[in-house]
């Protein structure tokens, strides 16, 4: 099979990309509006960028009407956010927050997700998240126009919260204890429980 992405409709391109770029880590992003209303939404186009300066990125794509999502709107007004990582125990709650709610209605409140105050940014973090990155907006790069166009959000990492129970004896994050989940195609997910070793060449 050969797919010509220069002629493929965006919705078909999106389906092929999300079915083959696997697994994708999940950024469960909390933001806050100028009026102080919280928002919590998952994004699986997410990755670390560099450590100097410490930076990550995630990508909210526009909805089917070509309108940026509430996360983008909030970050435009309050340029701070928290990227909460999702373990297996939080999977159902994370999935629930993908629902489309009216702007200003809080997913924390709607789905009974416990929030806790952040140290250096205004949006709260998910209290039960095994890892949470407090970030200040570095920049937004807009790619394309209309439905499924991208808002690539780069964040400078200010503080990271790591729950003690996911650390190993040396004080490092243990992927088995983290039990993070990643997005596959459609409704499928995987976890960090399935691992193997490949030693990098010198």
Image: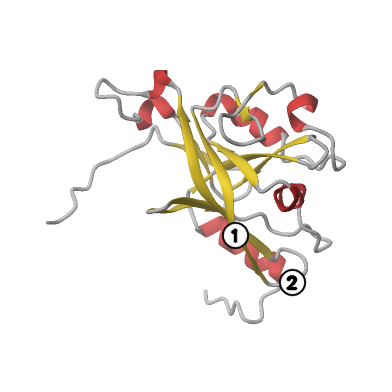
Q: How many marks?
A: 2
Instruction: Look at the image and name its color scheme.
Output: secondary structure
Q: Percent position (x, y) of residue 100? A: 81, 43
- Measure how far apart labels 1 and 2 are at the Cα level: 18 Å
**Disc 2, SS:** loop
How many C-alpha atoms fall within 10 Å of the one at disc 2: few (<14), some, or many (≥20)? few
Quadrant location of residue 7?
bottom right
How many C-alpha atoms fall within 10 Å of the one at disc 1: few (<14), some, or many (≥20)? some
Query: In this rendering, would 60 be left or right of 18?
Result: right
- Pick whichever of labels 1 and 2 is earlier in the sequence: 1
Quadrant of the image containing the C terminus: bottom left
Q: Residue at x 62, y 42 (%)?
A: 81
Please determine whether, in this image, residue 167 is positioned above or below residue 28: above
Verify CB contact (< 8 Å) between mark 1 and mark 2. Answer: no
Q: Residue at x 59, y 22 (%)?
A: 127
Residue sticking out furthest to the front: 120
Q: Percent position (x, y) of residue 113? A: 69, 23
Residue 139's disc number = 1
Q: Mark 1, mark 2: which one is toward the viewer?
A: 1
Please determine whether, in this image, residue 48 is positioned above or below residue 113: below
Find disc 2 in the rendering and name its residue.
145
Q: Percent position (x, y) of residue 17? A: 57, 62
Viewer-proximal residue among 7 and 67:
67
Residue 198's disc number = none
Q: Residue at x 62, y 81 (%)?
A: 6
Residue sticking out furthest to the right: 102
Viewer-proximal residue among 16 and 160:
160
Q: Residue at x 87, y 41 (%)?
A: 102
Residue sticking out furthest to the left: 202
**Disc 1, SS:** strand
């Amino acid at each position: 099979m050969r797919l010509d992405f220069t002629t493929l409709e965006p919705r078909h391109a999106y389906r092929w990309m999300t079915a083959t770029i696997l697994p994708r880590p999940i950024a469960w992003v909390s933001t806050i509006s100028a009026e102080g209303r919280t928002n919590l939404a998952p994004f699986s186009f997410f990755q670390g960028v560099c450590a100097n300066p410490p930076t990550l990125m995630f990508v909210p794509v526009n909805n089917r009407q070509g309108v940026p999502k509430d996360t983008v709107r909030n970050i435009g007004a309050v340029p701070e956010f928290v990227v909460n990582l999702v373990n297996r125990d939080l999977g159902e709650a994370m999935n629930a927050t993908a629902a489309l709610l009216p702007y200003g209605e809080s997913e924390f409140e709607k789905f009974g997700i416990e929030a806790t105050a952040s140290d250096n940014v205004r949006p709260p973090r998910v209290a039960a998240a095994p890892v949470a990155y407090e970030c200040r907006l570095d920049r937004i790069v807009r790619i394309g126009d209309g439905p499924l166009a991208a808002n690539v959000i780069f964040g400078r990492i200010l503080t990271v919260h790591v729950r003690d129970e996911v650390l190993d004896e040396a004080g490092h994050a243990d992927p088995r204890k983290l039990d993070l989940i990643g997005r596959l195609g459609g409704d499928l997910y995987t976890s960090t429980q399935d691992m193997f070793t490949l030693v990098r060449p010198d």
